[in-house]
Amino acid sequence: ARFILKKGNAEIQSHEGEKILHLNAGGYVTVTPLMDNDSYLPEQFTLEFDMMYENPREDYFDQVNDFTVKFYEAGDENYDGYGLGEFTIHSNEATILGKHGTGQNKAGNDVIKALQTNDTWHHIALYFRKNIAKAYIGATRVSATNNFPAGAAKLAFRTDGRYGYKIKNVRLAAGGDDKYNKIVTDGKFITHGILFDVNKSTIKPESMGTLNEIAKLMKEHTDLKFEIDGHTDSDGDAD
């Protein structure tokens, strides 16, 4: 509920027992976080959220559609403008990370297949440090740049009006994705990138990026010792 509607229609709804932010179809929609001031983004921060496309008809994935996170300088109230920079998922198959007009980066086949699967939540994670920016969909890094415009002070979610979208679990945090610093300061780190086949203990291939990153960390810091915790959903019986 901590969002301000700048354009179009959006509302808080319940979906499968959870509260979600619903961005309505049929018109361009822009929402911004409700903050105490106009300049709340530090030089280094992460933004994470879950997003679901609404698929109203069979030709959905043949239609051009954009879901965008826009970044603005302090004082810029032109939310219809290009802003300072953006992360855009274009037509369920490509991403844009940088100034408006930056070339598209086509996602890999696994990501495209996931984005084109109906009624599926997609975990989006963005990492920024000055001019460096990285974007992840699920466990896969889909874009990276060392030329993201510096000076972003605030952000907004924007859609192009063709379809509705659901958003939940929005998290904005100062700092970066440095797992070692997380361990030193918090004594732990949490990853969403290790996935299993349904009803099996088999780790999915797309988990290897996260696992390799953790393995590298452990090899570089042999003094660290870890306990691994995990969770599952409530499908199936206890056995």
Image (cartoon, rainbow, N blue to C red):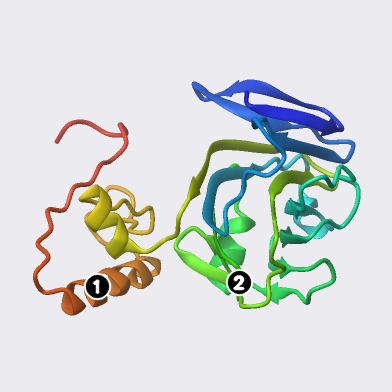
Q: Which mark is residue 124?
A: none
Task: Give the camera-side residue of 64 and 62.
Answer: 64
Q: Amino acid at mark 2?
A: Ser
Q: In the image, is residue 32 above or below residue 19?
A: below
Residue 146 in percent (x, y) is at 62, 78
Q: Residue at x 30, y 31 (%)?
A: 234
Task: Give the camera-side residue of 210 and 173.
Answer: 173
Report if the CB atoms under discs 2 and 1 are less than 8 Å apart.
Answer: no
Residue 160 in percent (x, y) is at 85, 48
Q: Quadrant of residue 63?
A: bottom right
Q: Which mark is residue 217?
A: 1
Residue 227 in percent (x, y) is at 12, 53
Q: Is residue 43 visible?
A: yes
Q: In the image, is residue 200 above or below residue 38?
A: below
Total numbered labels: 2
Q: Is residue 120 visible?
A: no
* Disc 2 element: strand
Disc 1: CA contacts within 10 A as few (<14), some (14-19) or many (>=20):
some
* Disc 1 element: helix
Which residue is tagged 2?
143
Q: Residue at x 45, y 59 (%)?
A: 176
Q: Nearer the viewer, mark 2 or mark 1?
A: 1
